[in-house]
């Protein structure tokens, strides 16, 4: 509903919109460090995650944000940052401290930073920066960045795909 409201207001007032990622906001809440692995519980044994690198004070997404099992994300981070020193930024402390991989990553110099769930101020700052840089989109171009298909879409695609292959 929030996205629809923003799009409607932008359309009515002829304004452009800054599209801000929740994972980017989480990563930007992390303190010092070159590498930030941002993640939140994605349920179903998965996380919504993205690996960011600081470049001249800016966060740059390395690859894409994705939904995947924690072990896969940890392996992706390990490959990208063989020297360690990663800041794991999350709202969900249990995703990290209770995980068997955490001991190894901690020994590699990684650290955990539990960030606030109140991301609105950071989202506003990122959006303002995007506006200053002219990185805005119109209401028609803005869409939710769902990085996981809904159960209904999965079921429909699985069923329709199976039906197509059966023909």
Image (cartoon, rainbow, N blue to C red):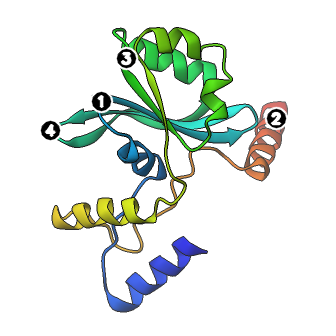
| Label 3 to label 2: alpha-carbon separation | 37 Å
Which residue appears at 49% of the width and 46% of the height? Answer: 115
The image's mark for residue 56 is 4
Q: Earlier in the sequence, mark 1 or mark 3?
A: 1
69 relative to 75, above or below: below
Q: Earlier in the sequence, mark 1 or mark 2?
A: 1
Q: Earlier in the sequence, mark 2 or mark 4?
A: 4
Q: Which residue is mark 2?
A: 162
Q: CB of mark 1 within 8 Å of CB of mark 3?
A: no
| Label 1 to label 3: alpha-carbon separation | 15 Å
Q: Nearer the viewer, mark 1 or mark 2?
A: 1
Q: CB of mark 2 within 8 Å of CB of mark 4?
A: no
Residue 74: x and y in percent read 53, 19
Q: Which residue is mark 3?
A: 80
Residue 117: x and y in percent read 55, 55
Q: CB of mark 1 within 8 Å of CB of mark 4?
A: no
Residue 44: x and y in percent read 76, 36
| Label 3 to label 4: alpha-carbon separation | 19 Å
Q: Earlier in the sequence, mark 1 or mark 4?
A: 1
74 relative to 149, above or below: above
């Amino acid at each position: 509903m929030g996205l629809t409201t923003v799009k409607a207001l932008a359309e009515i007032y002829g304004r452009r919109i800054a599209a801000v990622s929740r994972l980017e906001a989480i990563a930007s809440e992390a303190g010092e460090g070159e590498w930030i692995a941002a993640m939140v519980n994605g349920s179903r044994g998965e996380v919504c995650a993205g690996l960011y690198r600081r470049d001249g004070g800016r966060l740059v997404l390395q690859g894409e944000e994705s939904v995947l099992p924690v072990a896969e994300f940890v392996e992706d981070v390990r490959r990208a940052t063989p020297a360690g020193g990663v800041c794991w930024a999350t709202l969900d402390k249990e995703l990290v401290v209770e995980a068997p991989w955490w001991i190894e990553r901690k020994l590699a110099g990684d650290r955990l930073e539990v960030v606030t769930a109140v991301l609105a101020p950071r989202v506003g700052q990122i959006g303002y920066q995007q506006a200053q840089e002219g990185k805005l989109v119109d209401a028609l171009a803005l869409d939710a960045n769902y990085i996981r298909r809904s159960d209904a879409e999965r079921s429909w695609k699985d069923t329709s795909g199976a039906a197509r292959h059966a023909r």
